[in-house]
Image (cartoon, rainbow, N blue to C red):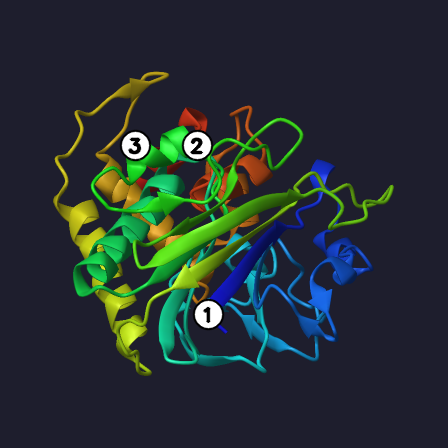
Amino acid sequence: MDQITIASLNLGIQKGKPLQNTYRNQINTEIFLKNGRICNLILCLQEIDINFWGFKNYGNVINDTSSNDGSKKENQLRIIYNDKYIRFIEQVKVKLNTRLQIASFQFGDYYFIIINCHMPQKKCEVSAYDNFFILNQIIGILNSMGIPFFIVGDMNHSTKELYSKFQEHKIFYANIKEKTTDANSIDNILYSSHNYRNDFEVIKNATSSSFNAVINHYAIRSTFNFENGFSLKYGFLQNIYDDCFSELIKYQKNKPQRLNKEIFGIEIRNDILISRVIFEFQQETNKIFNTKQFHEKYFKGFNCSCSALRRFLNGETQKSKCKIVLVNYLNNI
């Protein structure tokens, strides 16, 4: 067999319905099965419930993260693979808020890396920047070493925007402009120069929406020819990720400090100090930063909800009113 087929599907439910509805007969599995096996060989899922056990007779890789919080996007990533043909080698344990699932596989004599993504939306500037920073670092290393890779999933950015973000790297796009939701073209399969794309299709009947679970993404699928490449061993990929994450931390510490600003008359210290407070909050063992207590103690008098504060502390929004409460906290420690 000299071809590999890769598919991707975001099962996220619209309008904030409980995510657990996504694994209740939502996937039309016959789209992905052939003669009792997974015909696409690799199926990358995003926004899937942490308890999802569809395709249980196949290789099933749950993302390895530093948190067991099912609401975290990184814990809603899953790779299904045809274990009759493909051998799983290694998966990276990612840090908090790294919305990437990074794994290596062997297919005959062919070794390759899959990066299953659910990138933050553009409005989540800090989280999006951090994730693209790590992804750019990984791409650069893999390209320099001649290691074949595929980047798969919901990029939450158009192909044109991805061109800009990855302009320093030699990388190819399976989807150029075909819409993968009703309005956008944000799901993609990117691939290295070691692979040759044969086709690409958008599969609009891969899921069944219900009143309680309206899914607005289509599945995508592409078939590739490949070249034999770099031999991969256990531990290699984790070392690459750890090095890239260390580079992100260095950048965060060394980037030029922004000028202090005044928002509603309150001086904000530099963004690096605020980032450190956010980082401490994100550590599961730090009980000081209970969001509800934090909101009640420092956020009274501001028209911003506890949920908005939680989103800010998780790097999902940059609301200035949330920065005010951090300044109040910093001025009291």
Residue 227 in the image, given as x and y percentages of width and height = 33, 67
Check disc 3 and give the amino acid type. Answer: Ser
- Between 1 and 117, the one lying in front of the other is 1
Residue 16, compared with residue 102, is above or below; it is above
Res. 164 mark: 3
Q: Secondary structure at mark 1?
A: loop
- Between 118 and 5, the one lying in front of the other is 5
Residue 326, compared with residue 58, is above or below; it is above
Q: Which is nearer the N-term, disc 1 or disc 2?
A: 1
Residue 179, compared with residue 187, is above or below; it is above
What residue lies at 52% left-to-right and 25% top-to-bottom? 301
Mark 1 surroundings within 10 Å by alpha-carbon count, few (fewer than 14), some (14 through 19), many (20 or more): few
Residue 277 in the image, given as x and y percentages of width and height = 33, 48
> Residue 31 occupies which quadrant of the picture?
bottom right
Spatial CA distance of label 3 from label 1 is 32 Å
Check disc 2 and give the amino acid type. Answer: Lys
Res. 2 mark: 1
What residue lies at 46% left-to-right and 70% top-to-bottom? 2
Check disc 1 and give the amino acid type. Answer: Asp
Q: Secondary structure at mark 2?
A: loop
In-image side of 50 versus 24 (left or right): left
Q: Which is nearer the N-term, disc 3 or disc 1?
A: 1
Mark 3 surroundings within 10 Å by alpha-carbon count, few (fewer than 14), some (14 through 19), many (20 or more): few
Residue 194, compared with residue 268, is above or below; it is below
What residue lies at 52% left-to-right and 43% top-to-bottom? 310
